[in-house]
Amino acid sequence: MPYNTIRLFDLDFVSAENHADFFDDIMDYRNNPDYEHKKPFIITPNAEQVVKLDQPQHHALKEQLSQALFILPDGQAIILFSKLARKPLKNKLTGSDLFPLLWQRAKKNRQRILVIVSEEAVGVKLKQDYDNIMYYTPPFFSVDSPLFDKVCLDNFKTIKDFKPEYVIIGIGFPKQEFLGLALYQKLKEDNIPTPLFLFLGASADYYVGTKKRAPRLLQKMGLEWLHRLVLEPKIRWRRYILGIGPLFMLYMKELRKEFSKNK
């Protein structure tokens, strides 16, 4: 097998050189040997999300997401730490690189996709690129509001009627994960076959060009964060600077855990 999984931060990350090593398994997810006892999810946590999932208020969410069929390490910081912990992951596997692969394969096979995105313009461009999709742009909502229930119900009805093979949710962490979990539970309760849920953040935005990814050289160097910092300094600098402390503490916690297991 060209890939395996490595457990870090209580998550089983896929370790592979690139998406091609396991892409056919994604497209054939219903025949995955773990399909019956794991959730049909693809999650792509980066270092910031790993820190948030370790916070007490997100422990229940982490427990649910840890059961995902595919957990991809989306960020060089996770790769570097895995090497420090002597459990090296082969490479970062970003959602932004996965999206065009899945999109083009689904397009070639005429498979149905539901895309839930933050901006109407993204959905319109995706529909222009591939007609066998439906898209949904939710209003601003919080996960503990009645509006969340409406968003969930709207998309449940679409999945029930449209029967997509894939549901791509790109409305930001952790809203997209809570929405996907709610839809999954509702489908299970009603004995409706579940599609593959992909939590891919801004990947659709990058695909249609409403947002710009870092130049390829910066991507290879693991410096996409620097590109985002330059583009959105007011938002990013506080997030990155204030995030260093919690990330360091999480890394130390994980190292102590690994050390105690190896004693």
Image (cartoon, rainbow, N blue to C red):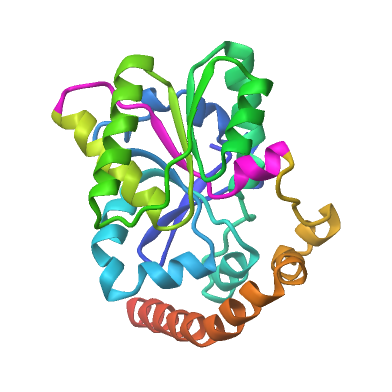
Q: Is residue 101 above or below residue 161?
A: below
Residue 235 in the image: x percent, y percent? 62, 73
Residue 29 in the image: x percent, y percent? 42, 28
Q: Nearest the camera: 48 or 79?
A: 48
Q: Is residue 205 magenta?
A: yes
Q: Is residue 108 above or below residue 216?
A: above
Q: Is residue 14 magenta?
A: no
Residue 48 in the image: x percent, y percent? 51, 69
- 170 relative to 148 in the view: left or right: right
Q: Quadrant of residue 126?
A: top right
At 63% from the left edge and 19% from the top edge, which residue is drawn? 130
- 70 relative to 145 in the view: left or right: right
- 119 relative to 174 in the view: left or right: right
Does any portion of residue 257 appear in the rendered image? yes
Q: Nearest the camera: 182 or 85?
A: 182
Q: Which residues are magenta?
A: 190-208
